[in-house]
């Protein structure tokens, strides 16, 4: 007949269920830990890429500012043929200040619109 021995002892089943639940908890913790590590790695890669972009933009801005200063010096030198160097520097500075004020005012109005819009 049936020679199989079936273990119907509830303590063995409980131990087996306890072991399975323990393994499930350990595996779940390992998966969660691995997911956290993956997210951290992705953030590190994005920060590296962003840092490189910011550094490139800053370098370009510094070089552009140096070029702008050179153009201002050239303008002042050219104006000295029509007026004294001090007056040429003052005229150039005043013109640039006026342009800067107009641009800042335009930006302020746009910012004011967007703040009150939301």
Image: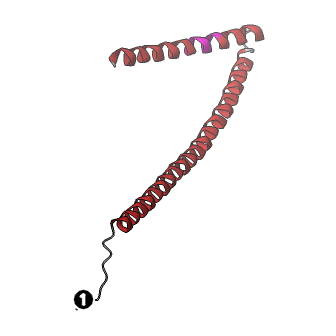
Q: Quadrant of residue 5?
A: bottom left
**Residue 105 vertical position relative to residue 7 in the rendered view, above or below:** above
Give the class, few, some or many, for how many residues have Cα within 10 Å of label 1's Cα (few <14, many ≥20).
few
**Residue 109 spot, x, y in % from top left:** 43, 13
Q: Is residue 46 magenta?
A: no
**2 lies left or right of 35:** left
Q: Residue at x 75, y 14 (%)?
A: 80
Q: Nearer the viewer, residue 28 or 43?
A: 28
- Judged from the image, the secondary structure of the residue bearing numbered disc 1 is loop
| Residue 96 is one of the magenta-drawn residues | yes
Q: Is residue 84 visible?
A: no
Frontmost residue, 15 versus 69: 15
Residue drawn 43% across the image and 17% down it? 111
Q: Main secondary structure of the magenta part?
A: helix
Q: Which residue corresponds to mark 1? A: 2
Instruction: Give 50 or 80, whichever is nearer the viewer.
Output: 50
Image location (x, y in percent) of residue 89: 72, 12
Which quarter of the picture shows residue 115?
Answer: top left
Residue at 61 percent across and 15 percent down: it is 96
Above or below: residue 47 compared with residue 28? above
Q: Who is closer to the viewer here, 65 or 13?
A: 13
Q: Residue at (30%, 85%) from the top-left corner?
A: 4
Highlighted magenta segment, given as a residue range: 94-99
Quadrant where the N terminus sits is bottom left
Q: Is residue 114 left or right of residue 47?
A: left
Residue 79, position as x, y percentages in the image: 70, 15
In which quadrant is the C terminus drawn? Answer: top left
Residue at the limit of the structure toward the right, as seen here = 85
Q: Position of residue 40 (x, y in %)?
A: 54, 48
3 versus 107 height, above or below: below
In which quadrant of the rendered view does residue 92 lie?
top right
């Amino acid at each position: 007949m049936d020679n199989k021995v079936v273990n119907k002892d509830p303590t063995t089943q409980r131990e087996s269920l306890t072991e399975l639940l323990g393994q499930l908890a350990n595996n779940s913790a390992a998966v969660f830990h691995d997911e956290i590590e993956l997210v951290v790695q992705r953030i590190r890669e994005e920060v590296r890429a962003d840092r490189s972009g910011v550094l490139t933009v800053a370098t370009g801005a510094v070089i552009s500012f140096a070029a702008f200063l050179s153009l201002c010096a050239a303008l002042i030198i050219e104006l000295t043929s029509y007026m004294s160097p001090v007056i040429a520097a003052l005229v150039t500075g005043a013109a640039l200040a006026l342009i800067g004020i107009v641009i800042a005012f335009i930006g302020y109005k746009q910012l004011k619109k967007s703040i009150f819009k939301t």
